[in-house]
């Protein structure tokens, strides 16, 4: 900032003479930091000092070491930095850099040049986690290694050994490995290393084997090359690997305890570990149980036991050696399943065999009942409300004598299955709700354990939900016995009809002449002169239907006298005397 300073000579209060001079107000010169902090022995090094340095001021640099040196400072592009040229020092030492006239100093270190003698190994996979560098003058803290421009901290073990971990992301080729100081990139050395493509594991088979070992593990992949000892590591147990080609290697599983064990591979004596597989060591297979006990052809049988494994083909054999086999699907080490495939019905034997047709060690022969398909009939026309919830009865018949009370029977309405109960030859199930946008006529069959069980097909029709539109009469006597006719939509009972006036349940019936339902009113206890209104409900096809209308119960009407008894055309009214009359009842 430019200020103007006025100098005045006064005589009393009247200025005698004055002059104006320019004056610059600048930040006080100061040092913030310097770069680089290291100077190589025998080299004159430019040191850039950052701070507050006005271009109009001349500064000098003083290097205080075993042999002090003073050099002029050169201003950089702006007022924030100066350049000082260090003398060439003949031996390692600590020196201080001072800008003459300022209080702050900067500590610098003169060190021997970094030298790289060798890399261990010199030929590696590009996916190696690290490489050991042997050389001289490695200093912990602040050293960098770079491979193909990828920089990372150099982990210094001691003055002659360090580890570079930036190799893993380098591309395969003969590349330069640079080592330098973070605060002195001019102190560096370089060497060449050869990188081969990182091996890739694509498939490993099988994925399981017996705890006794001896299973040959076949490994397929790419870029297999022997750069040292090659091995397979099953957890902490290492076995030798054989490299057959650039895409194929193998090893033999060791004896190990049962369980899942991580498997990794190395082709360069452990420098690079590849693969992220798992191998399951298992005990021999033992069969415990089979369910369900009653089934039809195609039904999935569920096997329980221990030691099931996916790398062994397991089959179920039916019919006591008649040659009916089906392939088992392994779900877990304790569960498997296989479909029933048998040419005979009734009780048949079941055994489990391995791919070489030898019975599984410890397996027990089981027995199931292979049930033939059944014929399904119904005693009544099959229809029901869109709302569902209606119980229907079906009759089944077959050549089998086996009872099905404890079997998983279901009714299949179109594609929807609902549970059913079986008592002797009668199957009962509840209708599911009708699905809008689907036909009202659907097929109806019976299934067993999810498999088709009926050899014929019935039809079931969904109809609009029963609805009451009118009842007559509406007013009835509390003495009961009145036949109330209920008209409406789809009031077509398939069985017993009941009526309920409020909480009073009575007999009902279907009047085929009127195509309606009739309800017989109950006898109601009533106080004299009072009228009772009760909502009417109908029990049709297993469900209660709210008529959404009321029936009014009133005192019975008794006529005691009439006047006049003899009338002419001029008589306009007859006076009736009695009891039970009400202004409410028409």
Image (cartoon, grey):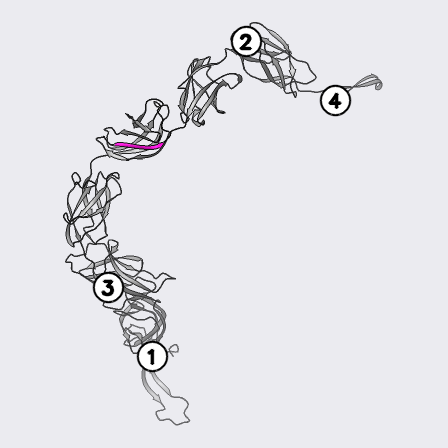
Mark 3 vs mark 1, CA separation in Å: 49 Å
Foreground residue among 562 and 77? 77
Q: Residue furthest top?
A: 67
The tag on residue 167 is: none
Of label 2 and label 1, which has the lower sequence position? 2
The quarter of the displayed image where residue 581 is located = bottom left
Residue extent of the magenta highlight: 216-221
The tag on residue 3 is: 4
Is residue 146 within the magenta segment?
Answer: no
Mark 4 or 1, which is nearer the eye? 4
Foreground residue among 315 and 448? 315
**Is the magenta region chiefly helix, strand or loop?**
strand
Image x and y of residue 557, in percent: 32, 80
The tag on residue 580 is: 1
Q: Is residue 528 above or below residue 298?
A: below
Of label 4 and label 1, which has the lower sequence position? 4
Mark 3 vs mark 4, CA separation in Å: 111 Å
């Amino acid at each position: 900032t430019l200020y103007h300073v006025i100098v005045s000579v006064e005589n009393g209060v009247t200025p005698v003479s004055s002059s104006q001079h320019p004056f610059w107000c600048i930040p006080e010169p100061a040092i913030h930091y310097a770069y680089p902090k290291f100077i190589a022995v025998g080299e004159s090094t430019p040191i850039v000092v950052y701070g507050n340095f006005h271009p109009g001021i001349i500064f000098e640099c003083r290097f205080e070491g075993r042999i002090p040196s003073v050099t002029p400072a050169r201003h950089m592009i702006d007022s924030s930095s100066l350049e000082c040229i260090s003398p060439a020092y003949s031996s390692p030492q600590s020196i201080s850099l001072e800008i003459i006239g300022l209080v702050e100093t900067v500590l610098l270190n003169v060190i021997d040049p970094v030298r790289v003698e060798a890399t261990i190994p010199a030929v590696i996979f590009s996916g190696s986690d690290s490489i050991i560098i042997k050389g001289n003058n490695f200093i912990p803290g602040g050293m960098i290694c770079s491979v193909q421009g990828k920089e990372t901290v150099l982990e210094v073990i001691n003055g002659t050994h360090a580890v570079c971990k930036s190799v893993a992301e380098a591309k395969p080729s003969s590349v330069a490995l640079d080592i330098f100081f973070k605060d002195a990139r001019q102190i560096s050395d370089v060497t060449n290393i050869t990188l081969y493509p990182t091996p890739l594991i694509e498939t490993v088979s099988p994925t399981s084997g017996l705890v006794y070992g001896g299973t040959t593990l076949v490994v397929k992949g790419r870029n297999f090359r022997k750069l040292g000892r090659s091995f397979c590591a099953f957890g902490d147990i290492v076995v030798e690997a054989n490299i057959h080609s650039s895409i194929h290697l193998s090893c033999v599983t060791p004896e190990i305890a049962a369980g899942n064990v991580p498997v990794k591979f190395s082709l360069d004596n452990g420098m690079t570990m590849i693969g992220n597989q798992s191998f399951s060591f298992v005990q021999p297979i033992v069969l415990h149980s089979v369910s369900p006990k009653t089934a039809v052809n195609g039904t999935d049988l569920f096997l329980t036991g221990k030691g099931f494994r996916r790398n062994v083909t397991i089959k179920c054999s039916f019919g006591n050696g008649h040659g009916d086999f089906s392939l088992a699907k392994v779900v877990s080490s304790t569960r498997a399943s296989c479909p029933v495939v048998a040419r005979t019905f009734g009780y048949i034997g079941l055994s489990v065999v391995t791919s070489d047709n030898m019975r599984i060690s410890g397996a027990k022969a089981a027995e199931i009942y292979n049930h033939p398909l059944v014929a399904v009939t119904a005693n009544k026309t099959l229809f029901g409300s869109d709302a569902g919830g209606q119980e229907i009865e079906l009759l089944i018949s077959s050549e089998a004598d086996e009872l099905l009370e404890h079997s998983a029977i279901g009714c299949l309405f179109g594609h929807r299955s609902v549970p059913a109960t079986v008592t002797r030859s009668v199957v009962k199930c509840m209708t599911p709700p009708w699905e809008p946008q689907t036909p009202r006529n659907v097929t109806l069959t019976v299934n067993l354990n999810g498999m088709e069980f009926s050899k014929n097909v019935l039809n079931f029709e969904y109809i609009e939900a029963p609805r009451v539109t009118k009842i007559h009469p509406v007013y009835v006597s509390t003495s009961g016995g009145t036949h109330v006719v209920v008209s409406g939509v789809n009031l077509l009972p398939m069985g017993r009809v009941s009526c309920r006036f409020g909480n009073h349940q009575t007999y009902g019936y279907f009047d085929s002449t009127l195509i309606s339902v009739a309800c017989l009113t109950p006898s109601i206890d009533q106080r004299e002169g009072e009228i009772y209104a009760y909502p009417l409900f109908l029990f049709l096809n297993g469900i209660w239907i709210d008529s959404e209308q009321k029936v009014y119960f009133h005192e019975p009407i008794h006529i005691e006298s009439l006047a006049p008894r003899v009338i002419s055309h001029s008589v306009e009214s007859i006076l009736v005397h009695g009891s039970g009359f009400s202004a409410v009842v028409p």
